[in-house]
Image (cartoon, rainbow, N blue to C red):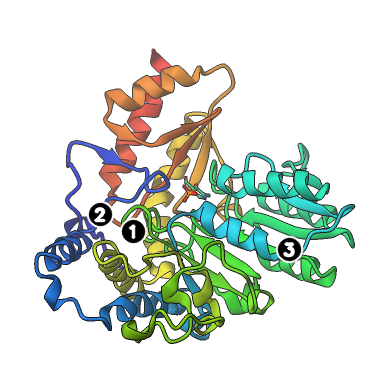
Amino acid sequence: MLTCQSDSFSLDPAVHYLNCAYMSPLPLRVEEAGIRAIRAKRNPALIQQSDFFSGPQSVKRLFAQLIGAENASSISLLPSVSYGIATAAKNVPVRKGQNIVLLHEQFPSNVYTWQRVASDARVAIRTVKLPSSGTNRSRAWTDAILEQIDSDTAVVAMPIVHWTDGTLFDVAAIGRKAHKFGAALILDGTQSVGALPFDVQEVRPDALIVGGYKWLMGPYSCGLAYWGDRFANGVPLEENWINRLGSENFAGLVDYQAGYELGATRFDVGEKSNFALLPMLNEALCMLLEWGPQNIQNYLSNLLQPWEDSSRNLGFQLGPSSSRGSHLFGLHLPPNLDVERVKNALISKSVSVSVRGKAIRVAPHVYNTSEDMQALVDALEVSLTY
Ligand SMILES: Cc1ncc(COP(=O)(O)O)c(C=O)c1O
């Protein structure tokens, strides 16, 4: 059983940080890996040519293990989620008259590219809203998505959990329906992979794009993607020397090569060897594999259990645990409670969460304790008495 890991971080004890969906705090061992990595460039003579390849390969292997991918050759390195989505969009054929399925209020990095595709190819975007009826948000929204997928669907591009309130989608069922019609399933796993178990063998997405600075606990500007067979002969966004065949032979680089290195390497971002940041992501992935996403969920669900009723008793609505993970969820305000009041109360109790529309997004992790949850309940209580 995973116990509280607050000693692995250097969070300010005066702040109740319940906001990993915004950005994870840097674990101490990841910080140390970063300092070592920055210092390494003091003496570039010690940076070997093989280091250009071994760093990326190690990170890919660890990520493949985290998501159950068979091997590292299906993984690529990204600077951002939008880069991964743009790569996917460049390689999914979309014909006039087809449609692209997205979700209402999906994160913009997984929307703007599809809007561009839709206007260039003159296809429709079907934006699926949460239906107003149905008590189980997760089931109702998944069913509404399934209804929108048909023989004209080219792409379903969506998250695993909604970034605003953590609503969990049955992406395996959505994938089955999409594949039945030949459509591609492109998943954004940024708000769950690392903290919530995910298995590519089970879900079979065509692509899974994950930003690295939230639940993967790495630095900013380093993300990862998994690519299924559909992308085996894809064209990358940029043509970088290091992704071409034989790039290990630096002396022969001007013998230009037409072919790419194995598998998804073709999609790697330029300067993928990122000597300062990749060792940090590598360390973060090692740490997450030691902890295990299911153990993280178990820790968090134990942390939340006593607290859920207290917040419901105060009139704040929280979905059932079956429709969300324990790492990210929305607390919906009681009717007539002004969101500004809640914001002020949270500040007065030094609670860091995000306010998204009329809901508070709470995103705890293994550094959080029952004192943090108590501070949140205290803040909710104060907001009712202003
Ligand atoms: C669901 C989701 N996807 C992606 C991102 C980040 O996108 P990008 O890496 O393009 O900045 C965020 C940031 O909050 C997010 O919540």
First along the sequence among labels 3 and 2: 2
First along the sequence among labels 1 and 3: 3
Q: Nearer the viewer, residue 383 or 329?
A: 329
Residue 26: mark in rendering: 2
Q: Are marks 1 and 3 in contact (CB under 8 Å)?
A: no
Q: Which residue is mark 1?
A: 217
Mark 1 residue type: Met
**Does the rendering let one see residue 160?**
no
Q: Estimate the spatial distance between the alpha carbons at disc 2 and disc 1, rounded to whole Å.
A: 6 Å
Please provide percent x and percent y for residue 116.
Answer: 69, 45
Q: Which residue is mark 3?
A: 174
Please provide percent x and percent y for residue 275.
Answer: 25, 67
Q: Outermost residue toward the top?
A: 386
Q: Residue at x 40, y 43 (%)?
A: 22
Query: Does ligand 1 reach within 8 Å of label 3's beta carbon?
Result: no
Taking the image as shown, residue 230 lies to the left or right of residue 265, namely: right
Give the crowd class for mark 1: few <14, some 14-19, many >=20 residues within 10 Å. many
Q: Nearer the viewer, residue 126 or 346?
A: 126
Secondary structure of the residue carrying numbered label 2: loop
Where, quadrant-wise, is the C terminus in this rendering?
top left
Where, quadrant-wise, is the N terminus in this rendering?
bottom left
Q: Are marks 2 and 1 in contact (CB under 8 Å)?
A: yes
Q: Residue at x 55, y 27 (%)?
A: 358
Please provide percent x and percent y for residue 283.
Answer: 27, 69
